[in-house]
Amino acid sequence: MELVGNFSSHLGEGPFWDSVTERLLWVDILGKKILEHDFENDVTMDREVSGNPGCVVLADDETLVAAIDNGIFSINRSDWSVKILAEADPNTRLRFNDGKCDEKGRLWVGTMDREEKDPLGTLYCCSAEGGLNPVHAGVTVSNGIAWSTNNDELYYIDSPTRCVCVFDYDLSSGEIKNKRELIKFTENDGFPDGMTTDSEGRLWIAFWGGSKVLCVDPISGKIEGKIDFPVSKITSCAFGGDDLSQLFVTSARVEINEEEEPLAGRVFIVEPGVTGLESNRYLL
């Protein structure tokens, strides 16, 4: 297990591997920063944004797309100029959280109740052609999103439910339907947070309050692997590296005793023995 640079996030989330530059992007939601680590020079660059960034993805080599507070923005990677692409519910109790692009370049991103109490949030699908469309309401803390390798299922986490749910998914239209429960976790597991998919279709799920990432077979719902971490609040994960064999895992130090967990907030690198899938880009 290794560490990425020296930066410690208040609430690290949303790792995204840039396969062109071989750099890692992620966000510090409470620190209001977008981070980028240059492995060649072992330097982490942090840029401040105007609100709480829930996620960041690439559109092209020079353009980022980030969900910040209730807006979706494009950001020029060189001069950091910002352009708004779409806006969601202006309710200040809500903010965007985790998000990810499908193979068609649509950004799937959900809102969450900042108080983490009520199902006020919504999962949205954002595209250059169709704008920002609500696709699933009644969400409390919208989190992990992933797809099956054949793109006929979408996996989704609303953290307080402690469940991974699955929808039938139509890649061409972006339609989801027939929601059902895939796997239910226990209180001892913590809360499922972000997740990703490996090249064989298994889910790798980060656990807030669980100090771990679990590997789950989405067909059987069985747990096939576990990676333990020296911090309790594991937030998300994404595959990257030269051959996509490394798993980058984000964490948080919010409400943590830093003497007990000195590595809380850091980004970890593990090699789980499998390869992942490349992060999809947003189609502008």
Image (spheres, helix red, strand yellow):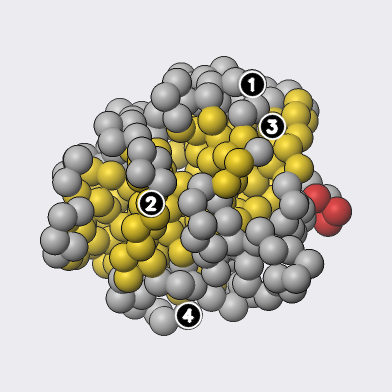
As measured in the structure, the alpha-carbon distance from the residue carrying label 2 to the one carrying label 3 is 30 Å
Disc 4 marks a residue whose amino acid type is Arg
Q: Nearer the viewer, mark 3 or mark 1?
A: 1
Q: Say the numbered circle drawn on residue 273.
A: 1
Asked which quadrant contains residue 190, the reply is bottom right
Q: Amino acid at mark 1?
A: Gly
Q: Nearer the viewer, mark 3 or mark 4?
A: 3
Q: Residue lying at the far front in this picture: please name it.
A: 41
Task: Say whether disc 1 or disc 2 marks the residue closer to the N-terminus.
Answer: 2
Q: Which residue is mark 3?
A: 215
Q: Disc 1, disc 4: CB below 8 Å? A: no
Mark earlier in primary sequence (2, 3): 2
- The quarter holding residue 96 reads bottom left
Q: Residue at 61% across / 29% down in the picture?
A: 271
Q: Which tag, 1 or 4, sits closer to the chain's start?
A: 4
**Residue at the spot x=69%, y=51% of the render?**
207
- Left/right of residue 47 with respect to residue 273 in the rendered view: left
Amino acid type of disc 2? Val
For disc 4, the marked residue is 93
Measure how far apart labels 1 and 2 are at the Cα level.
27 Å
